[in-house]
Image (spheres, rainbow, N blue to C red):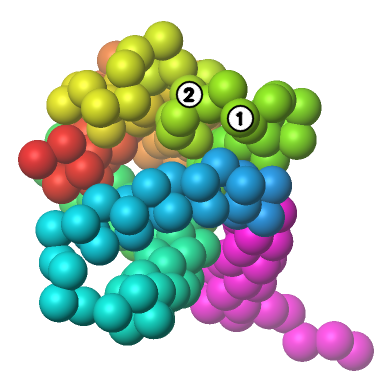
Amino acid sequence: MAEPRSGQDRIALPFVAFTVTYMVAGWAAQAALRPLNLRRETSELLRLRESMPQVTPAELRHAYTLLHNLTTALSLAQGPIYVALLGVALWGFVRLAGARWAFRGALRASVVAGAALVARQIALFAGAALTDLARVDSPDQLSLSPARYVNPDSQSMALLSSLDVFSLVLVALLAFAIVRTTTLSRRQAVGVAVLSWGVWLVPKVL
């Protein structure tokens, strides 16, 4: 007779499944965006070469390659990290609102809401695959957000790119989970969901 799974198992398995799915979708999106990113990198290398003539092209290319690999790895890891931190924020705000909620429940809700992040990567992949990237200056112009209509050099780009359809879906999923599993009202649940999402938006726009 099989032993019942522990609470940790019920959290760990969905989190691992989300992590793998997000990284695969993110890798596919990055691969589809490679022509655009390569053009942007080449332009940046030329600009740096002009500002630092003492650095050889080979040294500059090597340093830029390392930086590119690091940023790509961080990009793929940001989904799982975001979901984990979102669970912490969600749990904290629910407790501050006066409701009791096990941390496992908050983390489970954030993992479920993380489906919106996977969908964002899939949409980015589809947008890159179906668009002539020679006419695009930034990946944000492929997003389902106001950022696609704004100059890529705008200081508000980081904020606008975060206000996309998938952020709305993520907040809605969080609010639904809070209402179903805690004693908070719908209005309180929406407030907690928006606050939890907004906490991790602050560093992005600063």
Q: Residue furthest right?
A: 1
Q: Please give the range of residues in magenta.
A: 1-29
Residue at position x 67%, y 35% in the image:
128
Quickly name the residue at label 1.
134
Name the residue located 63 percent from the left edge and 31 percent from the top edge: 133
Q: Determine the residue positioned at 27% across, 32% down.
A: 158
The alpha-carbon separation of the residues under discs 1 and 2 comes to: 12 Å
What amino acid is labelled 1 in the image? Answer: Ala
Q: Pinpoint residue 173: horizontal percent, then vertical percent.
A: 51, 31
For residue 7, above or below residue 132:
below
The reply to whether residue 101 is in sight is: no
What is the magenta segment's predominant secondary structure?
helix
Taking 98 as reference, is 76 left or right?
right
Q: Position of residue 172 (x, y in %)?
A: 47, 24
Disc number lying in front (1 or 2): 1
Q: Is residue 20 above or below residue 165?
A: below
Establish if 14 lies above or below 189.
Answer: below
Characterize the local packing of mark 1: few (<14), some (14-19) or many (20 or more) Cα atoms within 10 angstroms.
Answer: few
Q: What element does badge 2 sit on?
A: helix
| Residue at which label 2 appears | 141
| Mark 1–mark 2 CB contact (< 8 Å) | no
Specify whether 150 is left or right of 167.
Answer: left
Q: Amino acid at mark 2?
A: Gln
Among numbered discs 1 and 2, the one appearing first in the sequence: 1
Residue 171: x and y, percent? Answer: 41, 28
Q: Quadrant of residue 151?
A: top left
Would you say 70 lies left or right of 170 here?
left
Q: Secondary structure at mark 1?
A: helix
